Every structure is written in C-alpha cells, then in structure tokens.
Amino acid sequence: MLVIGLLAFVAQQINPTNPFASWVNPDANRLTGPALRDLIISGLNLGVMYGLIALGYSMVYGVLGFINFAHGEVFMVAVMSSWITSEKLFEAGLWEDFFIPSLLLTVMIAIVVSTTTAVVMERIAYRPLRGSPRLIPLITSIGVSFFLQNVAIGLFGPGAKRYPQLPEWLTARRTLLWIPGVEVEGTKILVLVVAGVSMAMLWYYVERTKTGKAMRAVAEDKEIAALMGIDVDKTIVRTFAIGGAMAGVAGILWGLLFRSVVATTGFLPGIKAFTAAVVGGVGNLGGSMAGGVSLGTAESLGPLLLLEPMGVKGPTQLKDAVAFVLLIAVLLFKPSGLFGERLSAEDRT
Amino acid sequence: MNPPASDVVPLLELRGINTHYGPVHILKDIELAIYPGELVCLLGGNASGKSTTLKTLLGMVKPTTGQVVLDGEDVTAKPTSYRVQRGVTMVPENRRLFKRLSVKENLELGAYLRNDRDGIARDLERIYEMFPRVSERLSQRAGTLSGGEQQMVAMGRALMAQPRVLLMDEPSMGLAPALVQTNFELIQQIHESGVAIFMVEQNANMALSIADRGWVLQTGRVVLDDTAAALMSNPELRASYLGG
C-alpha cells in the first residue's frame, strides 16, 4: 500500500497526465513543490515538539521504569501558564511594545511552572510509591493526568483561549539563508532553533557533566549508585525537573505556533510524544528526538503523500491514524524501538 | 576478640547489632571491630547474614538495635554517602559495574564525592598502573569486559573513593577458577598499600590463607571469632567449611 501510494505520488510529480498518476485516484490534488516543502517544515516543527515532550517520558522511564502518563499534562500546564503570562502582558500593553523581554519572561514563567509541576508530582504522587510494582505508579500517573486536566478546567473553564497576536516581523515568511529560494515562517524557524538548542544542552548535561553521569548511574543501578555516594532521591527529582523543563520549552513553542490552548491540550500531544518515545526506543534520549521527528513528518506528510493518491477520502483528517499506525508497526516489527532500549530488563532491579 | 593492640581505636565497629526484615530476625547481637590496616574475613554459609552485615556497615540496611561506629563516632543514623566520604567503600557482590557506562566513567563515579581534581587524576593514574589492562579499555562500555577485567574495574572504582577500609562481598564469586588466585593477590596488593580489608567469602580456605583474623557467622550469630591460623585448625570449622 505504501509503495503504491508513493509510486502514484512520484508519477504525479513527474507528469500529471501520466496514466499511473490517475490510476488509483483520478481526483488527487497535485502537490506543488512549495506545498510539499511547507508540509515538511510543519512536520519537523511538530516533530521537535513531540521530541521535547518525549524526552520527559524517556528520562523518567530510564530512571524509574514506568511511563508517566501525566507528562502530557505538564506540557499543558506550560502552554496554559504561558498563555496567562502573555495575556496579562498584553493587557498591560507590554506584549506589543516590549515584545522580546515579554517573550523571555513568558518563557521563564512557563518553564518554572512546568518544572515545579513535575517536581511536586514526583514528591506527592510517585515517591510514596517507590518500590511498589511498576503498574502502580503507572495507574497513578493516569489519575494525576485526569486531576491536572480537571484542575485546569476548574480554574480556567473548558473553552479555548487565544494567545495575543505575535509581531509581524516574527511571523513573516523569511528566506532561509543557507537554502536560497526557500521561504519559511519566522515562528517555525524559531521553533526549530530553540528545540535544537535545548536538545544540545540536554545532551551536554547528560553525557558530559558529573550530575548527568550520576543520573545515568541511577538509571542503571540505584543501589550501587547510592554506594558511590550519589543521592538517589535528589537525582530522581532532578530527572523529573529536567523532563518538566523540556515540556515547558515545548509548551511555549506550541503556544507561539498554534496560539490557542484548552484544558485538554496536553492529551493528544502527550500521547503522540509517548508514541515518539516508543518509536525511538524508550529510555534512549537521542531516539526520543528522532522518534519525535519521524512521527511529526510522517503525520504531516503521510495523508497527502500516501493516502490521497491511494484514493482515501479526507486524508488530512486521518493524520492521527497515520501516527498510531506507525506506533503499531514499530511495536509489531521492532518492539524495542528504532534505536533500541538503552536499559534492558535484566539490568534493572 | 583479638585486637592487634589494645590502645588502637577500631576503624569500623558493630556493637550489639540486631536486624530484622519484617518479622524475620536476621542478625543477632553482632559484635565486631575492624582495626586500621587489617585484613579480616567473615565466613558463613548461605543465609547466615553475611550480606546483611555488610549492608549494615554501609547503612544500606538500618539495624533494629545496636550501633555502627566509625572512628569512634556513632554513624548508625547517617546515610551511606556520609560513610563513603569518611573512607568506607564496598566492592559489591558480582561486581555490579554500570554496564552501559564506559570504564572511565565507572572509575570517575567511584570518586563522585571527591572534589580534588588533581588527586582524582593522580589516583586514576595509580589505578592504570595497577591494572594496565583496564587502561587499554577506558572508552569501552564496562558491560563488554570479561569477568576478570570487570573485577579489576570494580576494585579500581572502589579505590577511587580513597577508602581506609574496603568491604568486599564475595570477591571470588563468579570468577573463573584461574582468576580466583590472581584476585586474592590483588586483594593482598591493595591491603599492602595500607587499606584495611573486610572480606566476606565462601571460599574459606583461600580467605583464611591471606587474612589476619576472621569470624564465622551462623544463622545471624557470630559462632567463632579467632585468628586466621586458629580458625584454619578449628575442627568444627574444618568439618563444615574446609572440607574435612
């Protein structure tokens, strides 16, 4: 099926009157070059945000061995708090006049709030359950997720909130310097750059610093890590905090890009990020990011590239289905994820 | 008790230790003392409480009653990291390296609580000299090493903490017979550099041949406490551990 779809698409691109192009679906829209490029960019944008959220799933899984389903809500809390901050700044007239300082303040508040949420969540909901079977914190995390969603509804109501307008110079389409002729919205460039920088910082922290080394040691063997003098509880808190901060970065980027938030904003991106983590291999940080990017692009390109030439009606509404088909395919053919699980079961106690 | 000299303060001491896991009474009135620079061993069969004794010394298990005394200071309520910082380190059973970290990272984690960069670099050099084979494999993942090499890394990792007393849990467990001898030679080498060694072993013959003193633990109680030579010739012990 994939092959037929791809072939049909390629045939269309080469020659629209090509009989093969209209063989399956005579009404298929011809995707133009710029449209394809925009789809790729949106896919990458979605992908890096999924990747940033997926890091939180992966890190907590690496250290504690359970999937924290409330992590999507940490992301939602970040989108919400950056909405509140930007809205207040807008009302005060600062958002438009002093955009950059306001944006930085919003970013800081979003990150602080999401980090705090993650840390408090660990302290209240998960630490008392340390040492119990892994299913128990997993179920608890689903409860925490509902709790946070409903708190958000209780505080801000169920309706969608709009972010204030972004300045013209940011949203304008710009030429990417290194690829002449390619124009992309400024916001989308910002998303890619910020996500890239956050990833690089995280990589440096985990792989090159002493505390990062301690974190990997705790992920592998808590008892021996404690024997080295590492404070295991503190390291676990730190893991949640970093996951929360990454979700915070993703949250503010999401807000800038889609400029809207509801109490359930965290649900679908949360599940998608979880999918990204599984696709890349849970517990593997690079894999999570790669999983996010492949999921984002698959979801963005799949419908128009594969489904439409195959004659599927309303293909763009099936983007979530594309994402989850990818999840099922990975689970069927390579259950440990594309990049393998960094921590195998026999190494944990 | 046969302390080497009556006026020396023990480095590490257990006083009247009783430990329970739930309703099960594991350790019963354990009294033992390790003096600076000694090589002592704790013998005992399965489920006699050897590992619990080690964990109690390190604070990984809290006793129900009794005291753990380090340099004359009661450290019963202090965390493991406090004791590690003051010179108590363990080479765990089955080595337990961080298999997915590199050999170098494993060694560096041994010095986690130290902040003296120069001292750490010097000790790394010392360990490379002691185990040349380890220094050839620094960037390799520790899990890819052979059992003997892993044992060297485990000892190196423990030495990086600058221990004054090294606790060894079943050092010859899981090693090829040919390596057991080398391993005991390494232990002696570390001992000669001035580190006190407290060794828990099933291989009683081998352990007693290098130790100064020893204890025999049976169902959580110290049943024998004597010099290594005396233990070697003890008929009871010979019957149960040394094979006639």
Image: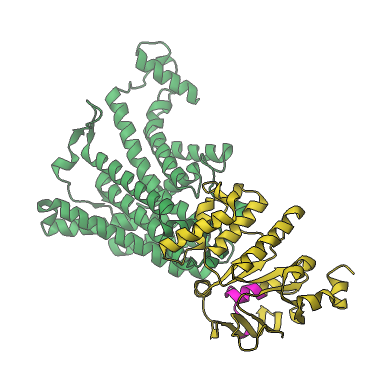
Chain colours: A green, B yellow
Image vertical order of residue A195 relative to residue A106, above or below: above
Horizontally, is A195 left or right of B115 in the view?
Answer: left
For the residue pair B70 and A165, the one nearer the viewer reads as B70
Q: Is residue A29 magenta-colored?
A: no
- Residue B22 position, x and y percent, is 66, 78
Q: Residue at x 63, y 68 (%)?
A: B191
Q: Is residue B60 magenta?
A: yes
Magenta region, residue range? B53-66
Q: Quadrant of residue A158?
A: bottom left
Q: Is residue A205 left or right of residue B207?
A: left
Q: Residue at coordinates 41% horizontally, 22% vertically from top-left?
A: A309
Does any portion of residue A81 appear in the rendered image? no
Toward which corner of the image does residue A16 lie, by quadrant? top left
Residue A150: percent from the left, percent from the top?
A: 37, 62
* Residue lying furthest right: B244
- Residue B15 at x, y percent in the picture: 64, 86
- The one nearer the camera, A59 or B138, is B138
A201 w.r.t. B20: above or below = above
Mark count: 0
Q: Is residue A258 visible?
A: yes
Q: Does B107 appear above or below B66?
A: above
Near-viewer residue (B203 or A156): B203
Depth check: A159 or B158 in front?
B158
Residue projecting furthest to the bottom: B7
> In screen coordinates, is A178 left or right of B184?
left
Q: Which quadrant is the C terminus of chain B positioned in?
A: bottom right
Residue beneath the point at 36% across and 14% down: A14
Quadrant where the N terminus of chain B lies? bottom right
Q: x, y (%) of residue A307?
A: 43, 28
